[in-house]
Amino acid sequence: MNALPISLSDIRLSMLDLVAVREGGTVADALAIALRTAQHAERLDFARYWLAEHHNMPGIASSATAVLVGYIAGGTRHIRVGSGGVMLPNHAPLVVAEAFGTLAELYPGRIDLGLGRAPGTDPLTMRALRRDRVETEEDFPRDVAELQRLLGDAQPGQRLVATPGAGTHVPIWLLGSSLFSAQLAAERGLPYAFASHFAPRYLLQALHLYRQNFKPSATLAKPYVIVGVPLIAAPDDAEADYLASSTYQRVLGILTGRRGLLQAPIDGFMAGLDARSKAAIGDFLACAVVGGPATVRAGLQQLADATRADEFMLVSDVFDPTLRLRSLDIAAAAMRG
């Protein structure tokens, strides 16, 4: 690993939104908050705003990802908007190509297509989405290649043409939390985003594998890495830790199988947990940056030096939407120095 520090000002900032439904709020509220947050991120000169596909989860309103991408893109002016990601096993590549091809025609030069190979849901919902389709490990690389063809220029004699889609060249990103997608992204010469906002264990190993094996392609000359960063910022460390208790509650719900709506912060929440729960939340959020301005800057610098990331993609589950925007303000200021 290169020991020289990397300048935070050289790293781009982006955001991943799970479109959390808050306790006491509605899905409509969550969608409106997402748009306001994207507009704020655009004012802060964030590079992109991504939305994640999840299904059958009461606290997350981003199941119809392509629809949401259009909603956010339509309410913003220049920020890139995309999926982080579309869970490809749930969809036929042609359907994805047509949806994102349509978005690319509506918002030229602004749409990203991030792809994951997990179902993003439970087995029951997975069967409902896929019907009788059975996925194997070989399907994901084949489906990615098909999407590349469908979004590329139509070739003479090509019988299956995505309309819209063909010729839009929507940028494809591979997403992952293990080594599989890192290897595939390297082989295909595609940009790579690691889901360290919830599964940081293989972060450094995956980035090393991706960079070591990267093969330049027509779309990308050298490796490009996004690292997911859970981030809660406030004027001081104590307030940030208090606000982060909403995230801690969400993570504990995921770990215990009791998912629900995003909860208001609770003073001293972590202190009331047993050691095992604290450790599990700590492992889940190993890449989290929580604190006041100085702590946030130090945490982001440490992550930058460890990962040499080209871009940080923030996930900020702050219960109060206004304080969430403030959190992004503090992060952006920290990156500028």
Image (cartoon, helix red, strand yellow):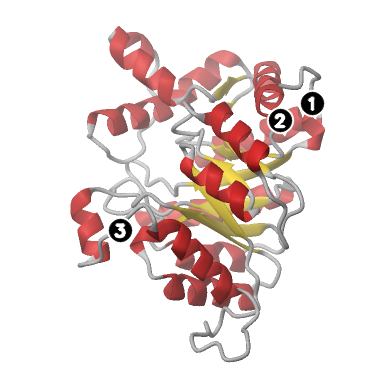
Q: Is residue 128 left or right of residue 245?
A: left
User: In the rendering, which numbered label is found on residue 135?
Assistant: 3
Question: Which of pointers 2 and 3 lies earlier in the amino acid sequence?
Answer: 3
Residue receiving disc 1: 6
C-beta proximity under 8 Å, tags 2 and 1: yes
Residue 11 visible (yes or no): yes
Q: Position of residue 9 (x, y in %)?
A: 81, 33
Question: Which of pointers 2 and 1 lies earlier in the amino acid sequence?
Answer: 1
Few, some or many residues within 10 Å of mark 2 (<14, 14–19, 20+): many
* Tag 2: amino acid: Arg
Q: Residue at left 54%, top 25%?
A: 287
Q: Position of residue 280 (x, y in %)?
A: 35, 19
User: In the rendering, which numbered label is found on residue 226?
Assistant: none
Few, some or many residues within 10 Å of mark 1 (<14, 14–19, 20+): some
Mark 2 and mark 3: Cα distance apart in space: 34 Å
Q: Along the line of sight, which residue is nearer the eye, 150 or 297? A: 150
Question: Which of pointers 1 and 3 lies earlier in the amino acid sequence?
Answer: 1
Mark 2 and mark 1: Cα distance apart in space: 7 Å
In this view, 287 is above or below 313: above
Q: Residue at left 22%, top 56%?
A: 125
Few, some or many residues within 10 Å of mark 3 (<14, 14–19, 20+): few
Q: Locate residue 170: give its quadrant.
A: bottom right
Q: Nearer the viewer, mark 1 or mark 3?
A: 3
- Helix, strand or loop at label 3? It is loop
Q: Quadrant of the C terminus?
A: top right
In this view, 293 is above or below 231: above
- Helix, strand or loop at label 2? It is loop
Residue receiving disc 2: 308
C-beta proximity under 8 Å, tags 1 and 3: no
